[in-house]
Amino acid sequence: MSATLDFNNWSCPIPLRSYPTIVMGHGGGGKLSAELVEHLFAPAFRNATLDALGDAAVFALDGGRLAYSTDSFVVRPLFFPGGNIGALAVNGTVNDLAMMGAQPRFLTAGFILEEGLPVAQLGAIVEAMAAAAHTAGVQIVAGDTKVVDKGHGDGVYINTSGIGVIAEGVEIAPNRARPGDVVIVSGELGLHGIAILSVREGLEFGAPIESDCAPLNGLVAAMLAASRDIHVLRDATRGGLAAVLNEIARASQVGITYEERKLPVPPAVAAACDMLGMDPVHIANEGKLVAIVAPDAADAVLEAMQRHPLGARAAIIGRVTEQHPRVVVARTAIGGSRVVDMQVGEQLPRIC
Amino acid sequence: MKYLDEFRNPEIAERLFAEIRRITTRPWAIMEVCGGQTHSIIRNGIDQLLPPEIELIHGPGCPVCVTPLEIIDKALAIAAQPGVIFCSFGDMLRVPGSSADLFRVKSEGADVRIVYSPLDAVKLAQANPERQVVFFGIGFETTAPANAMAVFQARQLGLRNFSMLVSHVLVPPAIAAIMESPHSRVQAFLAAGHVCSVMGYWEYEPLVERYRTPIVVTGFEPLDVLEGIRRAVAQLEAGEARLENAYPRAVRREGNLPAQQMLADVFTVTDRGWRGIGVIPQSGWRLSDRYRDFDAEVRFAVTDIHTQESAICRSGEVLQGLLKPNQCPAFGKECTPRTPLGATMVSSEGACAAYYQYGRFVQSEYDAQDAL
């Protein structure tokens, strides 16, 4: 791969052709996001560590293995039921590291502040970050602050990066799913996305819905203590369960089948999705993971999850199969089946 | 969610499938008119569980799919004007116009906003008196009452900065147009339950008579759809053609009279172009002359629209049930959900998008067998 990019005579690779400008969907965690990574970032930065395309990069350093990840947070509103942008920024990077089986250790935080932001709001956000870091057992060890003109930001943007240590014998990667493996989700789906939507759009769905924002490293440690035969872990953030399962199916060249009836979907999320024409499997979570586990280890891992407060509602939802490679299929409640694809861009409410 | 779970019961579904299999003796082609029903059929995998004799033809009832190119191009032109806040239901943002979609004009600086109700757009107009707020009023008889209410309220409030780009379409003229087509293969219709909850079903009785074709008013949950199919097949097998209401929990013969009064005040029936199909006489609503001041087409006088439909997209034939999506030469090649040439590839209930997903599944099963 010695190709170099000539930015004077540069044109977008073919799959980007229909959008010569960045559209919101490029940040939606669906196909448009994946294409940016696949056709722009990955070729430009090409190296084996990046090409693994996990939630975090994994590399060896002086004999030990480390996981390294970065994530930016642009959520609106800054405060929402169940959390705020600060808690999200810490937990997001903690979770990316945990999904490689790493114990997160050190985080950095970069702040882009908009002129006019009340200092009290920033204080509340920073306090939430400190509390989240304490809960997750990580230290925030470096930071940066920039201020942009009023109107050039949504109050606060936060970037966090983090490093974690991977224990001996832990081998977790998106391409390790094998036919016969069991698919487990750690709990109720769709809470974060619907919580944000309900406050952003002023929609109410009966019972108030709170974000599930939480650090998953403790849960992962409990799972790894039960068995090392965990092949893949992903936190089901933007794009939801559907995006994660599709990414695993493609990375591992396998098919994945799940039972719709076994999905833990809270009634309020189901009602909101019905009303808006959305699907819970496409809704973002901030404290839920998907585990692909060797069949022999599934029961032990599930039990360990259910004993942990963040995995109490964990459930086995499906299987990895050699049928329909790269395709995710849902068995529907009435016994039919359908292909579950990633969203193209952002999930859009349907009109009818 | 009890109120919905009881219409998704797997045991009752299996009984309905068994009953449909039992009474089906030969091939029948049934069109579900509404995109919401197509969505339910695909989402629940109903089409794969029906006996092979029963073919469901996905009708032109997805408002996203049939909104004419000219109106989309007008929407793009209006949205791009300085000072305009352009409001739309979410899934219209990805529908391709001649050269762009609303996401694209948004990325180029237009203020395009997704709203969940046209009344939200009225509120935006109140809150932003110095801006022109335009709502994209599309859809069938189902979305029309709320749109009518928005225009009505805007007039009551004396809002001079609110207008609506209207491209409403009506189901009964579309059914008539399909039946008048010499190529039509449709033998029975599932009428759209939510349209009928507004308009009633008396409008469909003359269609049943004229075309000797069963029409069953049908709901949207899996059991509703199955019951509609069961009744349609029963009529076809018996050689009958009646209007049946299989959605009585939501639909009465006369419909919702206050809503109809509001519609009659705000809208007037007009000829309407259907994307991919052509103009169907008296098949749409525009704002009535009383509300002309709120018509975005009048307010913004967007002329100079030169539409350019994709030369290879054959979504019109798909929408009429004349062509299977996978028989289109562009299907899965130039045209995918990621790079849609026509609206039928855009929304998840669009016939082409549905086929694309299912086809991927079937193809990969073939691949798996080949590999063995």
Image: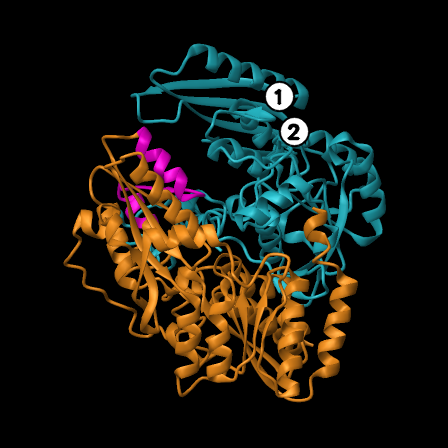
Chain colours: A cyan, B orange
- Residue A330: in sight, yes or no? yes
The numbered dot on residue A215 is: 2
Q: Which residues are magenta?
A: B103-127
Residue B141 occupies which quadrant of the picture?
bottom left
- Answer yes or no: do the residues labelled 1 and 2 have beta carbons within 8 Å? yes
Could you tell me residue A265's position as x and y percent? 68, 44
B196 lies left or right of B129: right
Residue A26, given in percent of the width and then of the height, sits at 41, 46
Q: Is residue B252 magenta?
A: no
Quarter of the figure with the C terminus of chain B: bottom right
* Crowd tier of the residue under label 1, counting other residues whose Cα lies within 10 Å: few below 14, some 14–19, many 20 or above: many
Res. A39 visible in picture: no
Foreground of the two, B52 or B187: B187
Residue type (three-letter) at the residue carrying disc 2 = Pro
Residue type, label 1:
Ala
Distance between mark 1 and mark 2 Cα atoms: 8 Å
Residue at point 78%, 46% (across, down): A229
* Residue occupying image coordinates x 37% and y 58%: B95
Specify the quadrant of the image occupied by residue A187. top right
Query: Of the residues under marks 1 and 2, which one precedes in the sequence?
Result: 1
Position above or below: A144 against A27: above
Q: Nearer the viewer, residue A82 or B117?
A: B117
Say left or right for A118 vs A53.
Answer: left
Secondary structure of residue under mark 2: loop
Magenta segment's dominant SS is helix
What residue is drawn where x is 40% and y is 22%? A155
**Nearer-the-camera pick, A263 or B282:** B282
Tell me the number on the disc at residue A71: none
Q: Is residue A28 left or right of residue B1?
A: left
On screen, residue A23 versus residue A196, left or right, reads: left
Q: Which residue is mark 1?
A: A132
